[in-house]
């Protein structure tokens, strides 16, 4: 099963994307629909809303008498932050429970479904890291106000109040793996959604089903200034999946060094207390979109002992064991290295990044090496890593000498 988190500000066009994904075979769990369902007449949700906001939020006559008067509730609940928090505190838990029921039902009905969770307040609720992929639909504020007034009967004042009460563009960008721009026509948005489905979502789901990681080309690319932001999103996702079992989570490798060309693969390190704990994480990491790879020891383990006394036993093969999980998402290849706290591989992964950052000449030497190796057109990433190993054997010694001199510690 692959879960997609879909969101966007009111009037941005999220429903168009949701409908497109549904037409393509996705199982859509619509937060708006659920939010209405849990406050229908006679429900626990409606009773709690009346207790909190009074009977003035109900229709008092006609065929809808006794049902929720949404504009009346909005006028009260969106008038200040405290009342809005009260509303969310009532509705969100009920929606979450019903969402879980629908997902369980979908999993029983279909093998390995792609479940699209359409959640209007995905960002505001802090739920984004729960999903292997987050898709945000965006349009500028004036476009959204115009749509709400023309097509949904909002007053301009109400439209702007609703927009102001939701997450900002900056907050949405911070969690977005995919940003769909809906400044054009609905047809253009549908084509963007279809392309995303066939080029990224379906391959992602198939990779998970087959237990295969995404297979990027081992091509050296110019440094991407967005790599740190991407790593922060991945770290949040890993932190949500691993919870208390992770001692720390770090962005490591070349993409963690500003200005350094690298393969377009984000390397992350999850530090754990033991390999037993590392093995416990396999299931939750798979649910987060990462598949386990059959590797037990670090490539390029140095033969020389560390110059730091605490690592006098770094030649012990067992201390170089790790677990490796790789993303199945073809749109964001990622390696997740799970290493034990205090073991030499875990320490060196942290040291190496700081050493490169602090020593421009070393960084330049390493970049020259990477370019020479890449120019040889090695057919796979294993050959690329093997060709760099002699340099790393010496780099290990030099990096720890720098650590001793500067007093570096993780």
Image (cartoon, grey):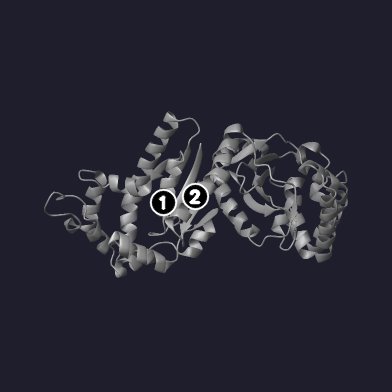
> Can you give x and y, in whole percent of width and height, for residue 214 in the image?
65, 42
Tell me if residue 38 can be seen: no
Residue at image location 69% in from the left, 43% down from the top: 339
Vertical placement of 196 versus 184: above or below? above
On the image, numbered disc 1 is attached to which residue? 16
Given residues 103 and 319, the one toward you in this image is 103
Residue at image location 25% in from the left, 50% down from the top: 48
Name the residue at the left extreme: 61
> Is there CB contact under 8 Å for labels 1 and 2?
yes
The crowding category of the residue bearing disc 2, from other C-alpha atoms within 10 Å (few below 14, some 14 to 19, many at least 20), is many
Q: Quadrant of residue 212?
A: top right
Say left or right for 113 vs 311. left
Tell me if residue 261 can be seen: yes
The crowding category of the residue bearing disc 1, from other C-alpha atoms within 10 Å (few below 14, some 14 to 19, many at least 20), is some
On the image, numbered disc 2 is attached to which residue? 193
| Upstream in sequence: badge 1 or badge 2 | 1
Q: Secondary structure at mark 1?
A: helix
> Can you give x and y, in whole percent of width and height, for residue 158 in the image?
30, 66
Given residues 250 and 259, the one toward you in this image is 259
Quarter holding the C terminus is: bottom right
Given residues 24 and 226, the one toward you in this image is 24
> Can you give x and y, in whole percent of width and height, for residue 105 in the image?
39, 33
Residue at image location 88% in from the left, 46% down from the top: 304
Real-space Cα distance between discs 1 and 2? 9 Å
């Amino acid at each position: 099963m692959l879960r997609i988190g879909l969101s966007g500000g009111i009037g941005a066009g999220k429903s168009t994307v949701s409908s497109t994904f549904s037409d393509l075979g996705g199982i859509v769990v619509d937060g708006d629909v659920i939010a209405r369902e849990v406050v229908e007449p006679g429900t626990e949700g409606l009773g709690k809303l009346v207790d909190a906001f009074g009977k003035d939020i109900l229709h008092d006559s006609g065929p809808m008498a006794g049902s929720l008067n949404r504009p009346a509730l909005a006028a009260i609940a969106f008038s200040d932050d405290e009342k809005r928090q009260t509303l969310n505190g009532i509705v969100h838990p009920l929606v979450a429970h019903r969402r879980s029921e629908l997902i369980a039902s979908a999993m029983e009905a279909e093998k390995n479904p792609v479940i699209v969770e359409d959640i209007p307040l995905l960002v505001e609720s802090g739920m984004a890291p729960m999903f292997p992929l987050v898709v945000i639909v965006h349009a500028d504020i004036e476009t959204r106000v115009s749509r709400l007034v023309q097509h949904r009967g909002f007053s301009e004042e109400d439209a702007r109040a609703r927009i102001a009460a939701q997450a900002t563009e900056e907050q949405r960008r911070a969690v977005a793996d995919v940003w769909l721009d809906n400044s054009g026509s609905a047809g253009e948005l549908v084509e963007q959604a279809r392309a995303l489905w066939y080029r990224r979502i379906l391959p992602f789901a198939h990779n998970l089903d087959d237990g295969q990681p995404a297979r990027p080309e081992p091509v050296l690319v110019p440094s991407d200034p967005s790599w740190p932001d991407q790593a922060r999103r991945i770290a949040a996702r890993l932190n949500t999946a691993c919870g208390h079992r992770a001692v720390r989570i770090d962005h490591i490798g070349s993409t963690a060094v500003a200005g350094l060309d690298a393969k377009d693969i984000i390397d992350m390190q999850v530090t754990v207390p033991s390999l037993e704990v590392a093995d416990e994480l396999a299931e939750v990491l798979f649910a987060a979109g990462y598949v386990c790879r059959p590797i037990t020891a670090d490539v390029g383990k140095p033969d020389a002992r560390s110059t730091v006394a605490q690592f006098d036993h770094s030649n012990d093969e067992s201390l170089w064991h790790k677990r490796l999980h790789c993303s199945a998402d073809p749109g964001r290849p990622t390696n997740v290295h799970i290493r034990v706290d205090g073991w030499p591989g875990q320490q060196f992964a942290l040291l190496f990044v700081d050493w490169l950052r602090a020593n421009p000449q070393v960084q330049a030497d390493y970049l020259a090496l990477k370019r020479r190796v890449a120019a040889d057109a090695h057919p796979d990433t294993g050959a690329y890593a093997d060709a760099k190993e002699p340099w790393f054997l010496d780099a290990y010694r030099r990096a720890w000498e720098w650590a001793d001199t500067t007093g570096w510690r993780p």
